[in-house]
Image: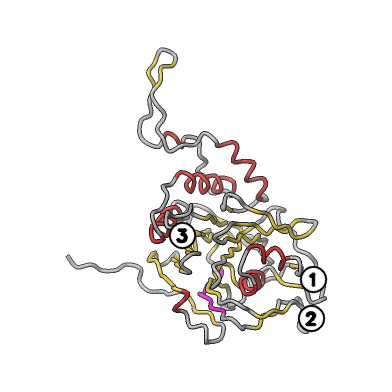
Amino acid sequence: MCTNFKMKQAKDGSVVVGRSMEFPATIPWSLAVIPPGTQGRGSTPEAGQQSKSWTSQYGIVGICGFGNPQLLDDGINTAGLTAHGLYMPNGCCHYADFKGDGSDLSEMDLISFLLGTCATLAEVKIAVQSISVWGGDPGLGFAPPLHILMHSEEGSLAIEFHPGGIQVVDNPTGVGTNSPYLDWHLTNLNNYVGLSADVPPARDDLGLKLSQFGQGGGLMGIPGDYTGPARFIRAAAFVALSEDPVDSLGAELQTMHVLNSFDIPAGIIEEALPGGKFVPEVTDWITISNVSQKRYIYRTTSDPRLYLIELESVDFSQPARATPFTTDVPFVQTAL
């Protein structure tokens, strides 16, 4: 399960997006670089079949699975567009059958195609009309059910896979988690209109003077579990109630602090893999995408330090590549 949100715009106009990736530690993750001019082709069920092909117009930095830079699950391009693949189980993801007519992409090809060929959300809506998305197994033993959340300075949207085909849904909140579909989450927000950063005042009821025992009473009733609906409400509330960041750096730091509240330690959630084996679900990594400054920041479960990539300093003259995450010791010794 994952959480994705656009932080409220900073006073200097900066836009920053946060994302957490929660999944059993079964996928080898890497940093990915895809330069402009890279030739992409969609995966196929069998060798020799025809699929969608494209040429990247924009450079991309992101996180990919299984050492293949095209299998992006998260990323930002040099035009300032971000994309994030989030799990969408329990009947809320219906991929098409493979057609073989040159329009096919697997779900794991989709982000590299969209970030490689689109600069705006309007272009994304047009590009989606030219493709058919089938469910391919990238190495998990099954095709992961997903939806794709995308952000720019101008807005946010969700790409969902319904029984009747692909639907692109504008997302006024900039928040996304998992099942059900986005329209359900937006309706569910109506159940939490009373959440507030304020402390409710003391009052006399039933002959008693009642008051809160401490701060935070305005958030009484906010869901605290890790389900998709609960995390959607928490993310929406945290973004809505947080202070306006002053500048780009402030927006990045505020995004980091909100992401910290969704971190999952190993052991508190266990998930059944195919075959019945139970494994802990953990926060594998988080990313902070600075859309305005073209900065990509990440942190992994084994190394809590934040690593920064400035897109303007990336060597896009080299071919597409995947670099495994650092395994450095996470603690920095300080002498006093």
- Element on which disc 3 rests: loop
- Element on which disc 2 rests: loop
Cα separation between marks 1 and 3:
41 Å
Mark 1 and mark 2 in contact (Cβ < 8 Å)? Answer: yes
The amino acid type of the residue labelled 2 equals: Gln
**Residue 31 counted in the magenta span:** yes
The amino acid type of the residue labelled 3 equals: Ser
Question: Which residue is tagged 3?
Answer: 14
Query: Looking at this rendering, what residue extends furthest in the left direction?
Result: 336
- Element on which disc 1 rests: loop
The image shows residue 287 at horizontal and vertical percentages of: 48, 64
Determine whether, in the image, residue 106 is placed left or right of residue 115. right
Local packing at callout 3 (Cα closer than 10 Å; few below 14, some 14-19, many 20+) is many
- Magenta stretch: dominant SS? strand
The count of marks equals 3
Q: Is residue 181 visible?
A: yes
Q: Is residue 120 above or below residue 164?
A: below
Mark 3 and mark 1 in contact (Cβ < 8 Å)? Answer: no
Question: Which residue is tagged 1?
Answer: 98
Determine whether, in the image, residue 165 is placed left or right of residue 210. right
Determine whether, in the image, residue 115 is placed left or right of residue 284. right
The amino acid type of the residue labelled 1 equals: Phe
Q: Is residue 139 above or below residue 178?
A: below
Looking at the rendered structure, which numbered label has been put on residue 49?
2
Q: Which residues are magenta?
A: 26-34
Q: For the C terminus, which image quadrant?
A: bottom left
Q: For the N terminus, which image quadrant?
A: bottom right
Q: Is residue 87 above or below residue 296?
A: above
Tell me which numbered mark, 2 or 3, is placed earlier along the sequence: 3
Image depth: mark 2 or mark 3 in front: 3
Tell me which numbered mark, 1 or 3, is placed earlier along the sequence: 3
Looking at the rendered structure, which numbered label has been put on residue 174?
none
